[in-house]
Image (cartoon, grey):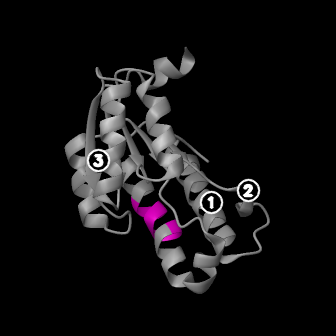
Amino acid sequence: EQLSRILGGKVVLITGAGGTLGSEICRQASELTPARIVCLGRRAENLTAVRDELRRWAPDVDVATEVCDVRERGRLAAIFAVHCPGIVFHAAAKKEIRDAETNPADAVMVNVQGTINVVELALESNSEMLIFTSSTKAFQPVSVMGATKRLGEMIVSSAASLSGRVFFS
């Protein structure tokens, strides 16, 4: 009931919506009658599958898909400007430890710069809430992936402190 009051009637943007975690957030959010769910992700085919499922699952909820990588600040800014999300779930991330260890620069760009982009644009577009999906690996990190997720937590925490907004991980 409390979540329905938070999400009900709002535009909800979910990054990483084509992934396992992001698509589950989409499913759960659709049950809480938001005005619109904006599914953002890098792979059109995954977003199409999520959109089609949500349209069957919650036919009264407007569902939009946006193909975008969170590293693409200009494209991301255009999406925030068009949809003006009130609530942002940031689930886009490099989550595979092995992948992050072999491509540390890519992990930094997605997990750190991508988070900076999403947080700054949420602030600029006056989003009232941002939820960053973190990782247990971010607690006392011992890997590149864990360290980048920890930096993401710190970025979100700092934005919350400086802005007074409800941004958390």
Question: Is residue 35 visible to us here?
Answer: yes
Amino acid type for the residue under numbered disc 1: Met
**23 or 53, which lies in front?**
53
Question: Is residue 126 visible to us here?
Answer: no
Neighbourhood count class around disc 1 (C-alpha, 10 Å): few under 14, some 14–19, many 20 upward: some
Q: In the figure, is residue 35 to the left or right of 160?
A: left
Amino acid type for the residue under numbered disc 3: Thr
Q: Measured along the vertical axis of the image, is residue 51 above or below residue 7?
A: below
Is the C-beta separation of discs 1 and 2 under 8 Å?
Answer: no
At horizontal 64% and vertical 77% (from top left) the residue drawn is 98
Where's the N terminus, which quadrant?
A: top right
Neighbourhood count class around disc 3 (C-alpha, 10 Å): few under 14, some 14–19, many 20 upward: some
Residue underneath mark 2: 136
The CA distance from mark 1 to mark 2 is 14 Å
Is the C-beta separation of discs 2 and 3 under 8 Å?
Answer: no
Expressed as whole percent of the image width and height from the top left, the position of residue 28 reads: 50, 30
Amino acid type for the residue under numbered disc 2: Thr
**140 or 92, which lies in front?**
92
Neighbourhood count class around disc 2 (C-alpha, 10 Å): few under 14, some 14–19, many 20 upward: few
Residue underneath mark 3: 48
Expressed as whole percent of the image width and height from the top left, the position of residue 117 reads: 40, 62
- Nearer the observer: mark 1 or 2; the answer is 2
Badge 2 marks a residue whose secondary structure is helix
Q: Which residues are magenta?
A: 111-117
Q: Is residue 114 magenta?
A: yes
At horizontal 71% and vertical 62% (from top left) the residue drawn is 138
Q: Main SS of the magenta segment?
A: helix
Is the C-beta separation of discs 1 and 3 under 8 Å?
Answer: no
The CA distance from mark 1 to mark 3 is 32 Å
Sequence-wise first label, 1 or 3: 3
Residue underneath mark 1: 154
